[in-house]
Amino acid sequence: MRYKLKKINNTYQLGKRYLNDFFHTDAYNKNVIEKGKTPSRTDVINYLVSKFNREVHYLEIGVRYPDHNFNKINAKFKYSVDPGVENKANPVKFKLTSDEFFSELKSNKILITNNKFDIIFIDGLHQANQVERDILNSLEFLSEDGFIIVHDCNPPTESHARETYEYVLSPSGGSWNGTTWKAFYKFRKSTTFFSCCIDSDWGIGIISKKIKLGEPTKINNPFFEFQIFDKNRVKSLNLISFENFMRILEINTKS
Ligand SMILES: C[S@@+](CC[C@H](N)C(=O)[O-])C[C@H]1O[C@@H](n2cnc3c(N)ncnc32)[C@H](O)[C@@H]1O
C-alpha cells in the first residue's frame, strides 16, 4: 500500500514537472497562437486561384481528408496525390507517393494531354529531403506564371520541427511541422526563383518563377540549426503578412 502511494506521488510529481516545464508551456502557448492565425492555407490558395485569367490546374500532394482543404479549392481542374499513410480510405485520384507520381508524369504514363499545373500545394511527407524533391519536381511541371505553395514552413518551436512525428509526448504534442523549413530555407537562397512565407497556418511558403516575391535570404545557416533559424526566421523565410503578400502581388502583376 505504501509502495503504491509512493508510485502515485512520483507520477503526480513527474506530471507537475511536465506541466510547468518551460518547453512544454511555450509550445502549448505557441500552438494556441498559431491555430488562431488567419487566413488559412485554403483561403490563400483560393486567393491565388482567383488571380488567373484562365481555368486553373491545381495539384495537391498529400491530401489526407479532402474536406479539410482539397474539396474547398475553387479550381476547375484538380488532381490529388496521396499514398494513404494517414487515411486508409484515401479518396484521391493518384494513390501514389509524390516520387511515384512525378516518375509516372516524367515517363508520360499519366496526364498525357496536359501535365502542367498552375498551383501545386506541397503538403505530403514533412521531411526536408522529401520536400526538396517535391519542390524540384514541381518546378518542372509548373506553368511559367504558376505558384508552388509549401505548407508547414514556419515551425514555432524546435519540438514542432522534430524529425519524427511519432514523438507525440514532446512539448508540441500532435502538432508537427517536421523539417519542411529546411527545404524551404534552401530555396530561399536561390537566385533563380522568388519566394516568401505568409505568417499564418504554420507558415505558407510561396515560390514563383516569375513574380518578384522578395530577395534571396542572406542568413547563413549552413548546418540548418533550429536556434539560428529561430533568431532569424523573418529573414530566413521572408516571413510576411497576408496583406503584405497581396500588395506585393498586385504591384508585380500590373501590366
Ligand atoms: C498533413 S496531411 C495533408 C493535409 C492536407 N493537405 C490538408 O491541407 O488538409 C499529409 C498527407 O501526406 C501524405 N503523405 C505521406 N507521405 C507521402 C508521400 N511520400 N507522398 C505524398 N503524400 C504523402 C499522408 O498520407 C497524409 O495524408
Image: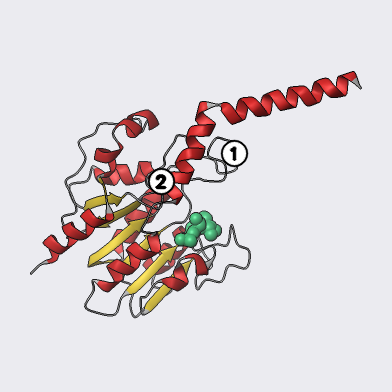
Residue at image location 25% in from the left, 66% down from the top = 146
Q: Amino acid at mark 1?
A: Tyr
Q: In the shown orientation, is residue 122 left or right of residue 207? A: right
Helix or strand or loop: what does disc 2 sit on? helix
Q: Residues within 10 Å of mark 2 (few under 14, many from 20)?
A: many
Indicate the quadrant where residue 88 lies.
bottom right
The residue closer to the viewer here, 96 or 170, is: 170
Indicate the quadrant where residue 220 lies.
top left
Locate residue 231, reporting x and y percent.
31, 31
* Residue 20 in sight in this render: yes
Q: Residues within 10 Å of mark 1 (few under 14, many from 20)?
A: some
Residue at image location 21% in from the left, 40% down from the top = 217
Locate residue 139, reporting x and y percent.
29, 59
- Judging by the rendered image, the residue that carries numbered circle 1 is 167
Residue at image location 41% in from the left, 44% down from the top = 128
Residue at image location 57% in from the left, 27% down from the top = 20
Q: Amino acid at mark 2?
A: Thr
Q: In the shown orientation, is residue 211 left or right of residue 18? A: left
Q: In the shown orientation, is residue 25 left or right of residue 248? A: right
Q: Quadrant of the C terminus?
A: bottom left
Locate residue 21, reporting x and y percent.
55, 26
